[in-house]
Image (tube, rainbow, N blue to C red):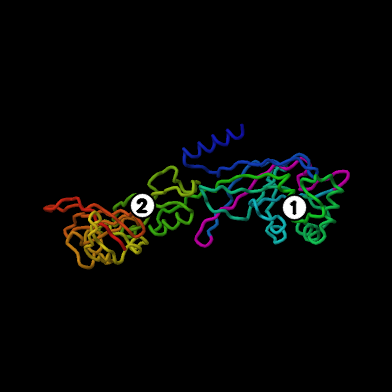
Amino acid sequence: MKKVIFLITTFIFVISGTSFADPWRITKYPRSSPFYGQPFKVLKVDVVKEIIKDGKAYYQYKIILKRPSWDDTTGVVRTNSFNLRLYYFAAGVGKDPYISIYRGLTVGQHKKHGHPRKIVLYLFEGYRPDNKYKKRIRIGLLPYPMIAGYDVRSAIGVHRSDYKSLLSVLLQIATIKEAILGKIKDVTIDSVLDRMLTYYGAVIELEVLSKVPNIRGMSKDRAINELKMRRLIPCITGYKVTNNKRLHGKVIGYSRKIPYVTGNRVHAKTKLCFNVWKYKKYSDNRVENTSSLNSLAGTWKFGRANTGQFLSYLELTKKPGKYGAYIIGGMHHENESYWKPIGSDTIIFYHAKGYKTTVFRKVGHNFFKGRFIPPPGWKGGNVTIHYLKK
C-alpha cells in the first residue's frame, strides 16, 4: 500500500512539474532493538538550505524521526538493569560511522518544538541535484554507556584500541545476535557500529531536486550561469523591446509562470526558458560576446557537403556588421557576408543585402551543415547543402 502511495505521489509530481519537497521513500525499515525497544520511524525528509560551492549548488537536508519506544525523549534509555544514551546517526550509504563521528562530522540533533517524541536530524553533507541517480541515506541509532562527560565520540575513542571492553558492555546489556557482531575475535569497533546500523537501522532513497533561482533583472550571462550551477538547462525564449537603455540585456523573467516560480523544486536537467529586454534604438538582435559567440568565432572550412567540394576558408569574426550579425572575413561570395550564432548549435549566414542564405545546424563536434537558401534573383537551384568545419 505504501509503495502504491509513493508511486501515485511521484506521478502527481511529474505531471505537475512542481513540488515543495523532494521525493523520497523508505527502502529498508528499521527493526526493534534490545537497546531501545520498538524501532524509530522516519516521518519526513525536508530541504534545509542551498549552498553554493565552487560554482555548484548543493542542498542540505533534515530528517524528522519518531523516537523509539524506550527513548525517554532526551535520548536516554533507562531500565532496571542499565542506562544508555542514544546517538542518532544519518549519512550516505557507504559512509563509515566510526570515521564520521571520530573526525567530528556528527549529525545535528534537536528536539522538535512541541513534539518531544520527535527528533530532527540535520545532514551537514550537501547533495548535488540529480534526476538519474537517487541518494541512499542510512539512518540508525548507536547506544553508548551513560557516563558523565562521556559523549559518543569519547566512547568510540576509548574503545578504538580495546574493542573487547566495549563488546563486554554490550553483551551485559542484551544478547547480541551473531548475525550482527559475527565472531568476537574478528570484530572491530568499526564493524560493530556498521553492523548495528545495517541490522537495526533504516535506509531511505532520495531524489535531490533543483531550486528554481530568481533570475529577474540579472544579465543574460549571469542567469545562464545561475541555472547551470543548479544543473538546470537554460534557454532564451525571445527578446522584448524597451525604451530603457539600462534594461538592455537584462532578464525579464521566466517565460512560463508554472512550474518556474522562484523557489520551487524541479527535476535536475529541467529546461527553464526566459525572456530578455532589448533596447529599442538598437536596430538588431545582435548577440553579445557570450560563450556561444566566443566558441564559434574563428577559422572554418566552407564547402558543399553534397558534392564534397571545398570552397574556401572563412573567418567568422566578432566584429559587428549589419543586420545584427557579424562580419565574415576571408575570400567569400556576397551570399556569405555576415554570420550570427543562435545558441551553440546554430549558425546563420546572411547575404550582403541582409537575406538569410544558409542556416547551419550542428551535426558533430565543430561540424555544421545547412541547406542553401537562394536570395531574390538567384538563377541557380536550391539543392546545395553547405558545410562548415572548424
The foreground one among 8 and 212 is: 8
Q: Is residue 354 above or below residue 4?
A: below
Segment colored magenta: 53-82
The local crowd at label 1, few if under 14, some if 14 to 19, many if 20 or more residues have their Cα within 10 Å, is: many
The foreground one among 303 and 344 is: 303
What is the quadrant of the C terminus in the image? Answer: bottom left
Q: Are marks 1 and 2 in contact (CB under 8 Å)?
A: no
| Residue type, mark 2 in image | Ile
Q: Is disc 2 placed on a helix, strand or loop?
A: strand
Q: Is residue 56 magenta?
A: yes
Q: Specify the label residue 236 is tagged with.
A: 2
What is the quadrant of the N terminus in the image? Answer: top right
The foreground one among 166 and 362 is: 362
Q: Which mark is nearer the camera, 1 or 2? A: 1
Q: Which residue is mark 1?
A: 193
Q: Residue 44: x percent and y percent?
A: 62, 42
| Residue type, mark 1 in image | Leu
Task: For residue 283, say whether it is visible.
Answer: no
- Residue that appears at 34% across and 58% down: 249
User: Seen in the image, is 236 located left or right of residue 376?
Assistant: right
Residue extending furthest toward the top: 1
User: Seen in the image, is 107 located left or right of residue 144?
Assistant: left
User: Seen in the image, is 114 located left or right of residue 242?
Assistant: right
Q: Is disc 1 placed on a helix, strand or loop?
A: helix
Q: Quadrant of residue 118?
A: top right
Q: Specify the label residue 57 is tagged with.
A: none
